[in-house]
Image (cartoon, helix red, strand yellow):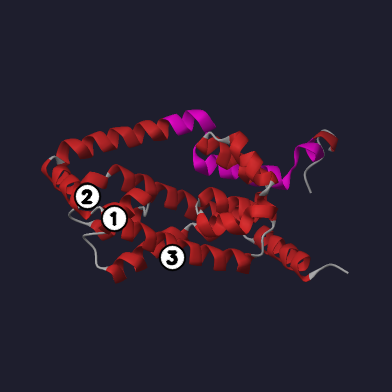
Amino acid sequence: MPSRRTTAASNGGKRSRRLPPLLLIVPLVAIFGTAALGNALFPALVNEHPLLLLALNATTRHLVATSTSVDVLPYVVVALGRRLVEDPFLYLLGRRYGDGAVEWMSRKLGAGRLLRAARRNFRLWGGVLVFFFPGGVVCVLAGASGMSLWLFLILNLSGTLATIFLLRSAGEEVSGPLIWVLELIGENVVPLTALSLVLTVAVLVRRHRRSGAPDREELARLEARRRDPPGQRELRPPGKPQS
């Protein structure tokens, strides 16, 4: 008789496979786009619109930089919402496409060997990784490994909250130097924003060259591979339509 954990994982995998692929692809492309925009406009937003910056991309740098200029409640609410908004989609991406999703992340990050090692050991250390490092890569690995959705959500939420409070405390501890840096950015906001835009575009171009296709095309290829695995394509007689 299968265990409850195995049954739950199987049911979660079936639910993710029933999702229309556009419900995964479109939100992720939009989220990645806003993240790039937040990175590009960091110098222009960090002093004048810190909450908008966090809403676009609540990275470690942005959380520390805005820790002294935003009240704790809006800071936590916006940062938590932004950090969590992509995680269920990435989890379901891993659940739906398995190793294909892990390969996609490795091409995006250029850390294939490290990700493959994490994939092999994720069942042993997965809970610890989701709590302490609740980022995009870990979310994909959690889905690909078959971690329970409810366990993932609980660990991800608690770990993300802990990370946000830790980064706010770190920013407050270095508030003196941080304020000096923010003032320097404010005095040179135009050239720094221009430089940030150029660097962001350069990173996106480099990522495109490394992966060979935009995110939406990569995700579409994963869906095509899931529906028509290479082995099945080889075995299907020529001219026979796909069922």
**Looking at the image, which residue is at 63% across and 55% down?**
126
Helix, strand or loop under label 1: helix
Asked if the residues shown at circle 2 and circle 1 are in contact, with their CB atoms under 8 angstroms apart, the answer is yes
Secondary structure beneath dot 2 equals: helix
* Label 1 vs label 3, nearer the camera: 1
Q: Position of residue 238 (x, y in %)?
A: 82, 33
**Residue 22 visible at all:** no
Mark 1: few/some/many CA within 10 Å (<14, 14-19, 20+) = many
Earlier-in-chain disc, 3 versus 2: 3
> Which mark is first along the chain, 1 or 2?
1
Camera-nearest label, 3 or 2: 2
Residue 56 in percent (x, y) is at 34, 54
- Give the distance between the C-alpha atoms of the residues marked 2 and 1, in whole angstroms: 7 Å
Q: Residues within 10 Å of mark 3 (few under 14, many from 20)?
A: some
| Amino acid type, mark 3 | Leu
Considering only order in the chain, which callout, 3 or 1, is on the residue closer to the N terminus?
3
Find out whether residue 207 is within the magenta segment: yes
Query: Which quadrant holds residue 24?
Result: bottom right
State the residue at coordinates (53%, 62%): 156
Reading the image, the residue beneath label 3 is: 161
Structural crowding at the residue carrying mark 2, measured as other residues with C-alpha within 10 Å and reported as few (<14), some (14–19) or many (≥20): some
Residue 211 location (% of width, % of height): 53, 33
The residue indicated by pointer 2 is 178
Q: Nearer the viewer, residue 206 or 20?
A: 206
Reply yes or no: does residue 85 show up in magenta.
Answer: no
Q: What amino acid is labelled 2 in the image?
A: Leu
Tell me where the magenta segment starts and ends, as one range. Answer: 206-233
Q: Main secondary structure of the magenta part?
A: helix
Residue, disc 1: 171
Q: Quadrant of the N terminus?
A: bottom right
